[in-house]
Image (spheres, grey):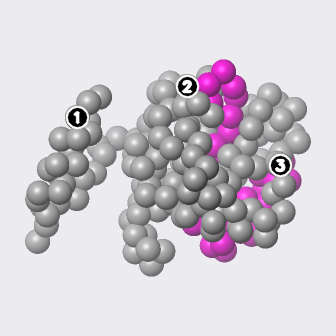
C-alpha cells in the first residue's frame, strides 16, 4: 500500500517535493486548487509541436485571456459540446473584452493540433497541450481518470486578467458540462 502525502508547496520547494516523490512510493496531492484572486502559475504549454512552448504567465501578461480545460481531446463531451461552444461564442466573448481564448488538455501537442483542426477552431481558439500535466497540477485541478490514461484536468473555465484569475468555474464533479460552458462563462462577463 502506497503512502499518501499532502504537501502545500512554498516557492523554491518544488525540488524537495520531486526528491521525496522519487525516493518514496507516494502520491503527491495539492491540498487546494487555485481561486479567484490568485496569480496564474508560470508553466510551459505546447502548441502544435514540442518545439513550440507557450508560457502561461507570458500568455496572460497585460491581457484578458479566457482559459478553459477539458479532460481530453476527442472525448465525446469535449468534442460535441465544450470546445464547439467556445468556437461558436468566440466573437461574443471578444466583444466582452476577451483578447484570446485558449483550450488546455493533458495531451500531446500533435493531438491538440489535430483536434483543433478537426473541430475547425481556426484562429478563434488556441489549442495548448499540458503534456505532463504540470499546469494542471500547479493549479490543483487534476483528477485521476485511469480510463483516459491517468492524470487529466478537471473541466473548468477561467478568466485571467494580466496574470490574475478573476473568474473561475470548476465543474463540481470535474467532468460535467454546466458552469464551465461558453455561454455560462460569457454570462458572467
Q: CA distance from mark 3 to mark 2?
A: 24 Å
Query: From this viewpoint, is residue 37 visible?
Result: yes
Hey, which quadrant is residue 139 in on the image?
top left
Where does residue 52 sit, x and y in percent of width and height? Answer: 61, 49
Closer-to-camera residue (119/96): 119
Q: Could you tell me which residue is drawn at 70 percent across and 28 percent down?
A: 64
Residue 174 seen by the camera = no
Query: Which x, y percent locates residue 157?
Result: 62, 45
Earlier-in-chain disc, 1 versus 3 = 1
Q: Residue at x 63, y 66 (%)?
A: 110
Q: Is residue 153 left or right of residue 21?
A: right
* Residue at the bottom extreme of this rendering: 147
Q: Position of residue 170 (x, y in %)?
A: 54, 47
User: According to the image, label 2 marks what residue?
Assistant: 164
**Where 128 falls versus 55 (above or below)?**
below
In this rendering, the count of numbered labels is 3
**Quadrant location, the N terminus:** bottom left
Per the rendered image, the range of residues in magenta is: 60-89
Please say whether residue 70 is one of the residues in the magenta stretch.
Answer: yes
Q: Name the residue carrying label 3.
A: 123
Q: Position of residue 34 (x, y in %)?
A: 44, 37
Residue 173 in the image: above or below residue 54: below
Q: Which mark is residue 13?
A: 1
At mark 2, the secondary structure is: strand
How would you rate the neighbour count of disc 1 (Cα within 10 Å): few for under 14, some for 14-19, many for 20 or more? few
Amino acid at each position: 500500500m502506497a503512502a499518501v502525502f499532502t504537501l502545500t508547496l512554498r516557492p523554491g520547494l518544488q525540488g524537495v517535493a520531486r526528491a521525496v516523490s522519487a525516493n518514496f512510493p507516494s502520491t503527491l496531492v495539492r491540498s487546494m486548487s487555485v481561486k479567484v484572486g490568485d496569480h496564474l502559475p508560470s508553466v510551459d504549454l505546447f502548441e502544435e509541436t514540442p518545439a513550440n512552448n507557450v508560457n502561461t504567465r507570458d500568455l496572460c501578461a497585460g491581457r484578458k485571456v479566457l482559459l478553459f480545460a477539458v479532460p481530453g481531446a476527442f472525448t465525446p463531451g469535449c468534442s460535441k459540446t465544450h470546445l464547439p461552444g467556445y468556437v461558436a461564442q468566440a466573437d461574443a466573448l471578444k466583444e466582452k473584452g476577451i483578447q484570446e481564448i485558449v483550450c488546455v488538455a493533458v495531451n500531446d501537442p500533435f493531438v491538440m493540433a489535430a483536434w483543433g483542426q478537426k473541430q475547425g477552431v481556426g484562429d478563434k481558439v488556441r489549442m495548448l497541450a499540458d503534456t505532463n500535466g504540470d499546469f494542471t497540477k500547479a493549479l490543483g485541478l487534476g483528477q485521476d481518470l485511469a480510463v483516459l490514461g491517468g492524470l487529466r484536468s478537471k473541466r473548468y473555465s477561467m478568466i485571467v486578467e494580466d496574470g490574475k484569475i478573476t473568474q473561475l468555474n470548476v465543474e463540481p464533479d470535474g467532468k460535467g458540462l454546466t458552469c464551465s460552458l461558453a455561454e455560462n462563462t460569457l454570462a458572467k462577463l
